[in-house]
Image (spheres, grey):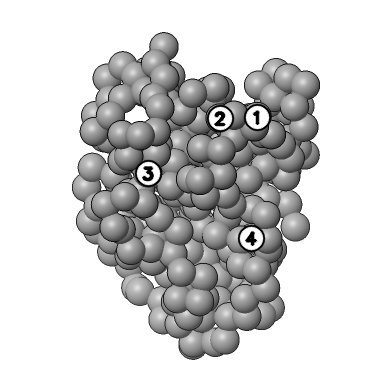
Amino acid sequence: MQALISAPQLLRRIDEPDLVIVDCRHDLANVGAGRVAYAAGHIPGAIFLHLDDDLSGRKTGANGRHPLPDAAHLAERLGEVGIGPGSHVVAYDASGGMYAARLWWLLRWLGFDAVQVLDGGVAAWLAAGGSLATEARVRKPVQFNVRPTSGLAVDVDTVFANLDRQEFIVIDARAPGRFAGEGETIDPVAGHIPGARNRFFQHNLTSDGTFKPVDALRAEWLAVLGDTDARDAVHQCGSGVTACHNLLALDVAGLGGGRLYPGSWSEWCADTARPVAKG
């Protein structure tokens, strides 16, 4: 299944019974904004999943701002909202796929491949003639079967050991200023993991918030990767969210295979023993 679905394609499939549309809208500066937006108007039939409450695990103060949820707990939650065998999931947000990509990656991590991201999100839906609804959808609970996909994520110890081993490259999805250690406003320490490369996730998008054409994405990503195979890259960001956007872009470009460092910078910088680079 292709990683992206266009708004016109979704319009044609909106009444299919196996379709589960998930509203993933969120605002890092206002964590209640997604629920407010969903209540005010969402794609008809959509359910809502919250980045912090549903798509992240328990924070310890040392494992990052959006740690991976427990796989069994996430599977239970997905089943509760009606995602199970035979479902076709479409995730959307209002941020160019920034948050929807997190659900896309999590589902693939659990071995569920029938998931797509709505290209352009709610804005593209409205531009294509789609309407919004305010009625909350309640789907019948089902059993979500976990088929774990190994090798999609790495932990902080693996990334730390790689500083010497250099077995993979690290690609940071944050804005260039934050990567350089300038103007950090979210995490307590500014900078990046030594040796990391920077690919701001917003560079995957056109000015209207949809993904760039495949050929353009592929060329840009090959320039970032250089001689490195996409499978030998580990992706991170501030907290393991926008890194999923880069992984989604690689899939769209036909260069899939990278891994996620879920703890990302917010976990890395929580321990002063881990080195920090700037510039």
Q: CA distance from mark 1 to mark 4?
A: 27 Å
Q: CA distance from mark 3 to mark 2?
A: 16 Å
> Closer to the N terminus: mark 3 or mark 1?
1
Q: CA distance from mark 2 to mark 4?
A: 28 Å
| Residue depth check, mark 3 versus mark 2: number of the one nearer the observer | 2
Q: Is residue 237 above or below residue 157?
A: above
Q: Position of residue 207 (x, y in %)?
A: 50, 25
* Residue at disc 2, secondary structure: helix
> Closer to the N terminus: mark 3 or mark 2?
2
Q: CA distance from mark 1 to mark 2?
A: 6 Å
Instruction: Identify which amino acid the numbered label 2 is placed on.
Output: Leu
- Which residue position holds label 1? 166
Q: Characterize the local packing of mark 1: few (<14), some (14-19) or many (20 or more) Cα atoms within 10 angstroms.
A: few
Instruction: Identify which amino acid the numbered label 4 is placed on.
Output: Arg
- Which residue position holds label 4? 108
Tag 1–tag 2 contact (CB < 8 Å): yes
> Closer to the N terminus: mark 3 or mark 4?
4
* Residue at disc 1, secondary structure: loop
Instruction: Identify which amino acid the numbered label 1 is placed on.
Output: Gln
Residue at screen point 54% across, 87% down = 142
Residue at screen point 67% across, 73% down = 147
Q: Characterize the local packing of mark 4: few (<14), some (14-19) or many (20 or more) Cα atoms within 10 angstroms.
A: some
- Which residue position holds label 2? 163
Q: Is residue 222 visible?
A: no
Tag 1–tag 4 contact (CB < 8 Å): no
Tag 3–tag 1 contact (CB < 8 Å): no
Instruction: Identify which amino acid the numbered label 3 is placed on.
Output: Glu
- Which residue position holds label 3? 267
Q: Characterize the local packing of mark 3: few (<14), some (14-19) or many (20 or more) Cα atoms within 10 angstroms.
A: many
- Front-most of residues 213 and 191: 191
Q: CA distance from mark 3 to mark 4?
A: 23 Å
> Closer to the N terminus: mark 1 or mark 4?
4
